[in-house]
Image: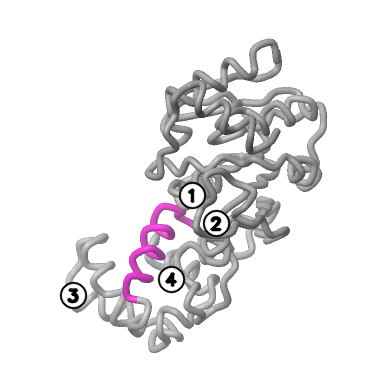
Amino acid sequence: MSISETKRLIRKHKIIPNKLLGQNFMVDSSLFPLLSEYAALDKMDIVLDAGAGFGFLTRFLADKCKTVIAVEKDPLVAEVLREQLRGVNNVSIIEGDVLRTPLPRFDKVVSIPPYYMSSHLVTWLFEQKIKRAVLILQEEFAKRLVAAIDSDNYGWLTVIACHSAEVELLDSVPRSMFYPAPKVDSVIVRFTPWSIDPFEVKNLMVFRQMVKYLFTQRNKKLCNALVPFIVSTFKISKKDAEKLATSFSFSNQRVRKLPPAAFGVISNVLAN
């Protein structure tokens, strides 16, 4: 695989890389063995490749595991993908949006997804029963996943990620490894779901809704930020909501200063 081969396919099929679809194609296969190693792939694994592009990574993965489910949204690119992988019998190609299209069962994810879908893809993966996921993600986005409390990058994504999986930022991936080159660098990120949750969450839906809402008020004290959420979500009076919001020992802390486990405590009280 090389930039010349990628350019050849783009010219041959008259594809104009779509910025809105995040079409920056990986043109350096030197990272592929590393991705496989980080995912600990073996011949029993069924691997999802989300945003498979022209299938260079897909072909590599097919040699390492039992089956690859390659998903590509762009119809023109999916046509090239099918052509490129003709004769590779353990690859299942699905044309469509990975977040909306019914998929066969998979147990690992190795992918270089388009940047635009990073947030939705990662939170979707947290809901799947998988052993491990290894993704190449935009560096700035990846830093949000592991941000320190009260830092600029600390937000709802950090809290949800902390509850869902062990998140490791591994090797840097320079923008020069893509064509067209994006404006930012990337990083390899490994997600390993917890065998035991780091803190209890009784109602995942309430937890996620609440965390996302509270970080829109990140500089407010918890007691002030929480009241409108309680009123609108649970349809109780403002007076009762204020009583509940001030009942927490950390109610006067700013939202951005609360550790992830504190959000679990709050959502568990609300879920009851």
**Between disc 4 and disc 1, whose residue precedes?**
1
User: Foreground: 143 or 262?
Assistant: 143
**Between disc 3 and disc 1, whose residue precedes?**
1
**Between disc 3 and disc 4, whose residue precedes?**
3
Q: Which residues are magenta?
A: 201-217
**Between disc 2 and disc 3, whose residue precedes?**
2
**Between disc 1 and disc 2, whose residue precedes?**
1
Q: Amino acid at mark 3?
A: Lys
Above or below — where is 80 with respect to 216?
A: above
Q: Amino acid at mark 4?
A: Ile
The dominant secondary structure in magenta is helix
Can you tell which quarter of the image residue 261 is in? Answer: bottom right
Check disc 2 and report the residue beneath it: 138
Q: Are marks 1 and 2 in contact (CB under 8 Å)?
A: yes
Q: Quadrant of the N terminus?
A: top right
- Measure the alpha-carbon separation of dots 4 and 1: 32 Å
User: Foreground: 122 or 36?
Assistant: 36
Viewer-side label of 3, 1: 1
Above or below — where is 245 with respect to 45?
A: below
Which disc is residue 266 wearing? Answer: 4
Viewer-side label of 2, 3: 2
Please give the name of the residue rendered at 42% of the width and 33% of the height, measured from the top-left corner: 16
Check disc 3 and report the residue beneath it: 238
| Image spot of residue 265 (x, y percent) | 49, 70
- Measure the alpha-carbon separation of dots 2 and 3: 41 Å
Which disc is residue 68 wearing? Answer: none
- Colouring scheme, one of rainbow, by chain, secondary structure, one colour: one colour
Which disc is residue 115 wearing? Answer: 1
**Between disc 2 and disc 4, whose residue precedes?**
2
Drawn side of residue 248 relative to residue 62, left or right: left
For disc 3, the neighbor class at 10 Å (few under 14, some 14 to 19, many from 20) is some
Drawn side of residue 116 relative to residue 35, left or right: left
